[in-house]
Image (cartoon, rainbow, N blue to C red):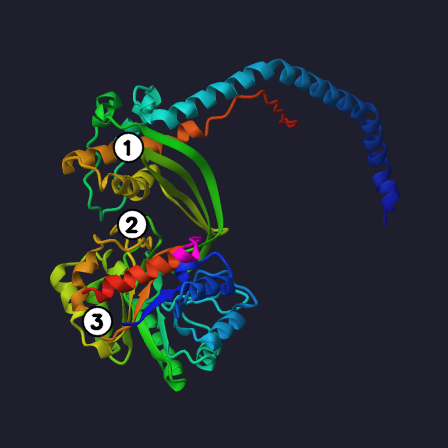
Amino acid sequence: MTDSNSLLSLYEELVQNHISQFDPQIADLQQLVKARMQELHDAEQTLVETQAIELKRITDALATDARCLLPTPGLRTFVQELKQTKSKNWYTRKPESSIAEDPTIWLLATLELPIGLTNYQNKEDPDGYDDERNYIGYSYTLSLRLGSVEHLIEVPLKRIYNLNDCTQTNIKEQIDYYIRSEVEGLFRNMEYPEEQKQQLAEEISVLVGYSPKIFTLTPRIAIFEYTSTWEN
Amino acid sequence: MELYLSLSAYGGISTREALTVFWNAGIRHTELAIGPRPDADAAQAIEDFRQLGMVYRAHHAFVWGVSHYPFNLAQPQDWKYFQRLTDYLATIGITAYSVHGGNFSKTTERKGAYAIFVENIHYLHQLCRERGIVLGVETMYPTPSLSAVENLLDNGAEFAQFCQDAPQIKIVFDLAHLNIWHDKDEIGLNQWLGLPAERLLEIHISDNDGRQDIHSRITPHTWWTSHITQFPVGVPLVLESRLNRLPVSVVQQEYERIVALIVSF
């Protein structure tokens, strides 16, 4: 039998040789990257802070009146995509969306009451349960204010039952099942013709459903990514 | 009229904490159910409040120990568990226990799942009867189209068939589940509510949007409120609207509001 020491000794010597030649250079490189990234973070600080101030200005505007989003291209694209999304549940009482693709001509634009959106928060519920099983639930909440009436809306996003079993709600389900019923509740005691209430409820629901795309915006910061792999 | 509040209405906390909220809200009728966090104190908490005067019934995979045991009666069962469960129910004097019909993968046949369920339910009925417990089976609801499974007893025709196949088993009407039935119609619902009281174990009440069983609160617009006068006399009701994290005063108000709603008709 070959002596294992003599079998591995040459390889181990080569590895030691590699370590002594290249590890110090890798350590120097890491220090260089670290120092350069610190310089970049210092340089970007003003721009990052300005982004944060701008995002605060945007969320303040949503709190004052979220209809400021109506002319934005992002909302228009969102509405176009939403209208192409068919309801996956065949048992639905509501017809497919009939709102205009251009939000600037929505009835909502003419409403005299402001629509305030505030307090967006992501939630995790480790103790969720349905009729039969427990799950970890993920959702978001936000406050919707219509004139002087305010309502907390919770929108379920995902349920994890176990490693191999989770369910997610798509954006249409979020709007049609969870946001719409809360918005309709806000209108229940308001004196508008029923047809207008329905249209306004649909338009506000879409606006609320779109708003997480704005609330979850964060300042862009410089990130250095490098993967030390190569192909032979 | 007896109105029970389901522990599923106030989950996410320990059984003792939930029962304390119920007790402080003046509630003396509780249905044990899924909802509370399983813990080693659950059985003791149930017993402590029983000695204070809380009256219980139990539903499906209710929490009574350190772990939760979900089960699907459309599949073969570990009957040792059900022997322990029914022994426990008998020990604490519970005489009403209800279960779901089970579910099956959409890639398998409903007929086979139903046959297993009926066989299981007969065996469970035997275990219950030997211990002085009345068993009930609940009306279920169609799952969303994206779901990988379907519930048994999610439609009027199959439930009518079950009533014929197992006439000795009592029925639990979940009026919120009936709101999701695809074959729902006024005449059919009136026929169900017209069944003799002795055929029913209890009636579960909450609300939803007609599509998903979201256990929302009952409003004047809730579909079954216009049918209250047809409710069979003497059949206990179980309130299942979610009240999680709400203060004791709100739980009390909600419970009393539903009592007043029912007795006003």
For the record, the magenta segment spans B244-249
Q: Secondary structure at mark 1?
A: helix
At 33% across and 23% down in the image, what residue appears?
A69
Q: Is residue B56 left or right of residue B138?
A: right
Is B139 within the magenta? Answer: no
At label 1, the amino acid type is Ile
Verify CB contact (< 8 Å) between mark 1 and mark 2.
no
Q: Residue furthest left?
A: B187
Say which mark, if any, is on residue B161: 3
Q: Is residue B132 visible?
A: yes
Q: Position of residue B37 (x, y in %)?
A: 50, 60
The label nearer to you, 1 versus 3, is 1
Q: Secondary structure at mark 3?
A: helix
At 63% across and 24% down in the image, what residue appears?
A226
Q: Is residue B211 above or below residue A39?
A: below
Mark 3 and mark 2: Cα distance apart in space: 24 Å
At 44% across and 64% down in the image, what residue appears?
B24
Most foreground residue, B163 or B53: B53
Residue under circle 2? B145
Q: Would you say the magenta stretch is mainly helix, strand or loop?
A: loop
